[in-house]
């Protein structure tokens, strides 16, 4: 499932990407363009804008664009509502997308990160991934544990063991 999130929920974009869901951030007030992108890219619209949903409901239904009106200001509640409504699986693809540019992460060898990560990171970790688009390198660490704990607390699900942090 792919999402497009309107300009009021930038933090939700990050967490959906962490969960492994292709998510783009739409930062314009043009509702017709939002609908056009969602239709063209087969994306589900997530919004907090009830006026948009009321005004464009017929257009969304005619074009078969799935959408969800989220009620909460809290990113945790928005994520819970999205996951529960669409029955998203957080175990299957978590931590497979770059949280900055939404592109897939690929495994790279430890030798390939020599000189590109701090020495203590190179000495402490054996597995690394990189975003081929923005070239950021990710590895497991304490940031991983905090994100995993947050997701587990939200959903009471066992997450995968392989999680990453941003360089």
Image (spheres, rainbow, N blue to C red):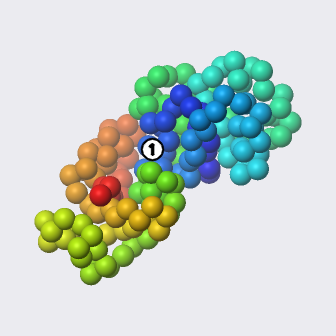
Q: Position of residue 56 (x, y in %)?
A: 78, 26
- State which quadrant residue 105 falls in: bottom left
Q: Is residue 76 left or right of residue 40?
A: left
* Residue 163, quarter of picture: bottom left
| In the image: residue 81, left or right of residue 64 | left
Please give the name of the residue rendered at 62% of the width and 27% of the height, measured from the top-left corner: 69
Residue at image point 71% right, 44% down = 38
In percent of the image, x 76 and y 45: which residue is there?
39
- Quadrant placement of the C terminus: bottom left
Judged from the image, the secondary structure of the residue bearing numbered disc 1 is: helix
The residue carrying mark 1 is 14
Q: Is residue 66 above or below residue 128?
A: above
Q: Is residue 110 above or below residue 130?
A: below
* Residue name at image x 76 percent, y 50 percent: 40
Q: Nearer the viewer, residue 65 or 137?
A: 137
Coordinates of residue 27 in the picture (x, y in percent):
59, 35
Q: Residues within 10 Å of mark 1 (few under 14, many from 20)?
A: many
Relative image position of residue 123 (x, y in whole percent): 14, 71
Q: Nearer the viewer, residue 120 or 158?
A: 120
């Amino acid at each position: 499932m792919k999402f497009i999130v309107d300009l009021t929920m930038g933090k939700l974009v990050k967490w959906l990407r962490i969960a492994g869901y292709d998510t783009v951030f739409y930062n314009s007030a043009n509702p017709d363009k939002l609908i056009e992108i969602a239709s063209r890219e087969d994306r589900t619209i997530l919004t907090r804008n009830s006026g948009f949903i009321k005004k464009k409901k017929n257009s969304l239904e005619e074009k078969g664009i799935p959408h969800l009106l989220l009620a909460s200001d809290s990113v945790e509640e928005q994520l819970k509502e999205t996951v529960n409504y669409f029955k998203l699986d957080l175990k299957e693809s978590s931590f497979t997308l770059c949280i900055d540019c939404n592109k897939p992460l690929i495994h790279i060898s430890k030798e390939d990160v020599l000189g590109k990560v701090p020495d203590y990171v190179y000495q402490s970790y054996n597995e690394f991934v990189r975003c081929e688009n923005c070239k950021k390198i990710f590895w497991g660490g304490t940031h991983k544990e905090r994100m995993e704990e947050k997701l587990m607390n939200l959903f009471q699900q066992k997450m995968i063991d392989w999680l990453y942090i941003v360089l």
